Amino acid sequence: MRAYFLRLIHYVIALAEFLQHLVLRMPLYAIFTPMKLKTTASTIQEDSKLLKKIPSHVGILVAEDEFSLKDLANVIVWSVALGISYISVYDINGEIKRNSVVLQRNIEKSKLDIMAQDQSSYDIQLFSTSQPAAEATSNSKHKPHKADVLLLCIEDGHKRIVDMARHVSQMVTSGMLRQEDIIPSRIDNLFQESFHFPDPDVCLKFGNTDCLFGYLPWQMRLTEIISMPSHRGIGYKCFLSSLLRYANTSQRFGK
Amino acid sequence: MIHIQSIVRVAVETSVAVLHPRRPTVSSKFKRKIQIMTWFPERRRPTWLQRLCEAILKSGPVPQHVAIIMDGNRRFAVKNSLEKCEGHVRGFDKLAETLEWCLDLGITEVTVYAFSIENFKRSPDEVNGLMELSRQKFAKLLEERNLIQEHQVCVRIIGDISLLPRDLQELLAEAVSISANNKRAVLNVCFAYTARDDMCNAMRELSSGVKDGFIRESDISENLLEKCLYTSHSRSVDLLIRTSGEVRLSDFLLWESAYTCLAFVKVLWPEFSIWHLYAAILHYQRNYNKIQIARQNLMIERERLQRESDHRCMLEEETEACSKLEIIPPGKVSIPTTHSIITQNKNVQALVQQYAEARTERENVFLAHVYTKRADFIKSLLPKHPVLITKPPVTLIAS
């Protein structure tokens, strides 16, 4: 009897907390999504001046069951317009990785929509660790704004570290690396060589579960984790406010 | 919501006022002996409200292992115009209190980030102050060894303690060794730790294991790497709390916290109260189901990968054996064909099973080697004649 009573209270509290979250996060949706004000590349570039620092690599972590590639494409294009050149998209099951073609199409559409006449000067390339980017064509080299989008899944997390451990032990056995050289800075260089991406500066985590779901354990050492309830229907203002939050934090690097 | 916030605020203010009645200020050099709060504060009776909250929370899943980044000691000191070191003292006191709350709630393992390798970059004054504080705290802990045994707390040090001053290493080693067999609760103190250093250390162990022939390169897996980490003896981390409103992991438990509920709390660590802990646990309970599903899937996936790898390695081994046989009797054409028939007929399942058993055996021998090495390192730091210290009268009589 007592146990049931306690459990009942537990449910009530959990429900209250849920509602509180809903109410607190609602305004972002209610105010910004219906606003059909067109976000253009020039306004975004204006906004980029508001940011004290612009991340070089933005990680997008989708911890939701349903995906909207259209909204993801929007987030990617906004990021590129802000001047971010490295973007990675992670979902645990690799659903987005599998649908890279559709995502690419969505990005083209969203690019046309947002960049309008400037769109030809932007080059957004999609690739994944199993499918490295094709050699840049001569034509894309001349584009002033170039961005790489890396699609990631669970395999790029712990498994990459295990691969590295194997690689390192191979190097040690063959005498290419000394035992005492297995130190973070050295290993990090090896990771950088294989990834071609800097560590993410900020991770935009979409979904209500506060968990990383295996997201890049090695690389996310100093990454700012900014949570948002969902990527579906995300508005530009909401996206910008999260980057503003990133820009306003200062890291002390242990000091 | 407003109610909860005001309750938290009042609770924090009163607890700060009650617990720290005008502590004498500490000199920046930290030489003066300060009043050291015990690791096992006298149990304060929880209020009826706390007891009720506890009972309510316990009707849901309670995390078994909580990790804490105790951030904000210095900002607390600045905010309250105290010396930096005083902020750290308050932080340590808060830790003792928090451990008690955790035990009351049934949280049996707590991991705290006490000192990062990066922290060595701080001003020498502050680093020395922190070392001195740790020395005093661990000396106090050793003084209270009967209380450790009474509470059955096991203390483990996570990190590369060889980077620390020798006398502190000895203190830590003694604390670890006297509490090693305690079972009720575990306190992991991350000292001279960063997660990347931990992973590199594991890679070093693995590569020397391969080099010395304990294991094969193909044996390196997520499970094996995990068992080479400093945290290998801990259960998986369920909840990670970081105070002071920062939203990053700062090189703490990167590998282990991939499937952990994260709770970022706004307050500075010395202001952390039991209500914040309750809120964090509620947060954990809200996230529990999704994380649990992800963990189960991960387990299944790892098992599948392991089986696949065993299968592949077994086939490689077999083909190698076959090719050797082919080479030995040259000119005989019939042997390869008979062999392929034999391999086909052999039960592949049984072979994989056999391979897996051999691999597990290799891993176990390797891990035993690694753990003995670590235990020996701790032993080497212990005082040379512990018998003399604990039982002086006996030896006197004997001599």
Image: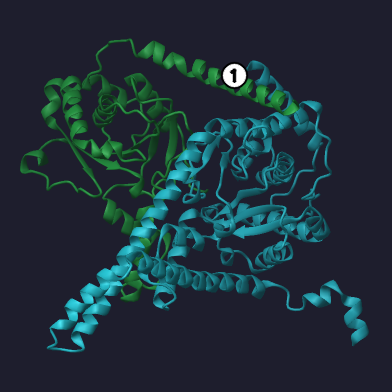
- What residue is shown at x 43% (from left), y 72% (from top)? B358
Q: How is the image coloured?
A: by chain
Q: Residues within 10 Å of mark 1 (few under 14, many from 20)?
A: few
State the image coordinates of residue B373 (x, y, percent, origin top left): 56, 73
State the image coordinates of residue A231 (x, y, percent, origin top left): 35, 26
- What residue is shown at x 17% (from left), y 77% (from top)? B337
State the image coordinates of residue B97 (x, y, percent, origin top left): 74, 42
Letter of the cyan chain: B
Res. B80 in view: no
In the rendered image, the quadrant that contains the N terminus of chain A is top right
Establish if B66 lies above or below A205.
Answer: below
Q: What residue sits right under mark 1 in the picture?
A: A16
- What residue is shown at x 38% (from left), y 46% (from top)? A216
Q: Report the side of B229 relative to B323 (left or right).
A: right
Establish if B141 lies above or below B289.
Answer: below
Establish if B267 lies above or below B223.
Answer: above
Q: Quadrant of residue B330?
A: bottom left
Res. A130 in view: yes
| Host chain of mark 1 | A
- What residue is shown at x 65% (from left), y 75% (from top)? B380
Residue found at the very far left of the displayed protein: A138
Instruction: Say which colour chain A has.
Output: green
Instruction: Tell me which amino acid carries mark 1.
Output: Ala
SS for dot 1:
helix
